[in-house]
Image: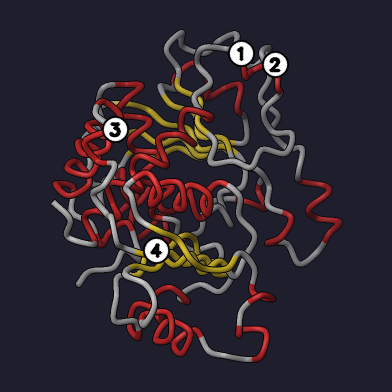
């Protein structure tokens, strides 16, 4: 039995295999419509979510399975003080696989150590979000045709952005990736990401404060929102939230085949005018998330 807590739990070969399966699901949905018939997914969401939770639920329903669970901690026994370890043991009695989101880093790992069924980390605090990373990789592969030899810019909240941390970790396994890190001083990438992933793997990277300066070089631009829920001080959040706003003017010097990604939700960091630009890929990214989660659920349930 395997769980997925960190993107590094998967080898490059396994990531490529999941992408291949997801592409086959896109081409031949009817082939997969009963693959998980009789199986149940438990969605344990201790933190609000729209896309990730509904994406997991849609994925399981489209595989012919069923879904049970909760969408906020207050509607679970966590509100009575039940531990994550006990919750995961209990839910193992009812379901075949768990998708868990939790505000505390490491909670899905604790769940996986106590559950008797596979656990998927659907986001833990500012730490990890491996299924969003799989959706990002599928989107890049479908848009660019490759997962190597390109330049990607990460823009916005690089300090608390778990999707950024996970995607950088995943890309470290691919050849000839250049990374441009674009953020205000207060939201730079954590040192451990630089030291343990970028420097250790000899990945070329540059840190800058200017999105405009980086733009002409980018093949992929990964925008993020400044996350109010991760700040201790509201004044700091208000001061930083509008640091980078992507609009059509900023795209004037961008490549014609730039792929613009965003893990969503968007607040105001991408102008709605950009939505109609053919380079905007963030709603395709949402749809890709469903297909890659279908592939992952099948893999962890060992469904052929």
Q: Which residue is mark 1?
A: 276
In-image side of 108 versus 235 (left or right): left
Q: Which residue is mark 2?
A: 273
Query: Looking at the image, do the residues carrying marks 1 and 3 touch, with CB atoms under 8 Å apart?
Result: no
Give 163 or 17, whichever is nearer the viewer. 17
Give 105 or 59, whichever is nearer the viewer. 59
N-term-proximal mark, 2 vs 4:
4
Mark 3 secondary-structure assignment: helix
How far apart are the two marked residues, 2 and 3, measured between alpha carbons?
32 Å
N-term-proximal mark, 1 vs 3:
3
Give 241 or 51, whichever is nearer the viewer. 51
User: Which numbered mark, 2 or 3, is in the foreground of this view?
Assistant: 3
Q: Residue at x 30, y 29 (%)?
A: 26
In-image side of 233 versus 58 (left or right): right
How far apart are the two marked residues, 4 and 1, measured between alpha carbons?
35 Å
Q: Which residue is mark 3?
A: 29
Q: Which residue is mark 4?
A: 41
N-term-proximal mark, 3 vs 4:
3
Residue 273 x, y percent position in the rendering: 70, 16
Query: Looking at the image, do the residues carrying marks 2 and 1 touch, with CB atoms under 8 Å apart?
Result: yes
């Amino acid at each position: 039995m395997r769980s997925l807590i960190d993107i590094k739990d998967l080898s490059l070969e396994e990531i490529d295999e999941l992408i291949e399966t997801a592409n086959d699901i896109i081409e031949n949905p009817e082939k997969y419509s009963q693959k998980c018939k009789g199986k149940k997914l438990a969605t344990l969401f201790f933190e609000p979510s729209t896309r990730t939770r509904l994406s997991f639920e849609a994925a399981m329903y489209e595989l012919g399975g069923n879904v049970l669970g909760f969408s906020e901690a207050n509607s679970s026994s966590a509100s009575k003080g039940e531990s994550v370890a006990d919750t995961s043991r209990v839910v193992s009695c009812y379901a075949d696989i768990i998708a868990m989101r939790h505000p505390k880093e490491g909670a899905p790992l604790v769940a996986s150590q106590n559950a008797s069924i596979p656990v998927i980390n659907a986001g833990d605090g500012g730490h990890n979000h491996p299924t969003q990373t799989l959706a990002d990789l599928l989107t890049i592969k479908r848009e660019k045709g490759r997962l190597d030899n390109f330049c990607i810019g990460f823009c916005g909240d690089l300090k608390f952005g778990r999707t950024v941390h996970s995607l950088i970790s995943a890309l470290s396994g691919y050849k000839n990736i250049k990374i441009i890190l674009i953020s205000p001083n207060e939201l730079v990438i954590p040192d451990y990401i630089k030291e343990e992933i970028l420097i250790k793997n000899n990945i070329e990277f540059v840190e800058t404060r200017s999105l405009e300066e980086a733009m002409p070089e980018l093949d992929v631009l990964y925008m993020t929102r400044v996350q109010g829920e991760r700040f201790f001080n509201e004044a700091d959040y208000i001061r930083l939230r509008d640091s980078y706003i992507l609009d059509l003017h900023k795209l004037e010097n961008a490549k014609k085949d730039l792929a613009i990604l965003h893990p969503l939700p968007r607040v105001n960091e991408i102008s709605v005018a950009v939505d109609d630009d053919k380079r905007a890929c963030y709603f395709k990214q949402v749809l890709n998330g469903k297909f890659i989660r279908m592939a992952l659920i099948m893999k962890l349930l060992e469904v052929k």
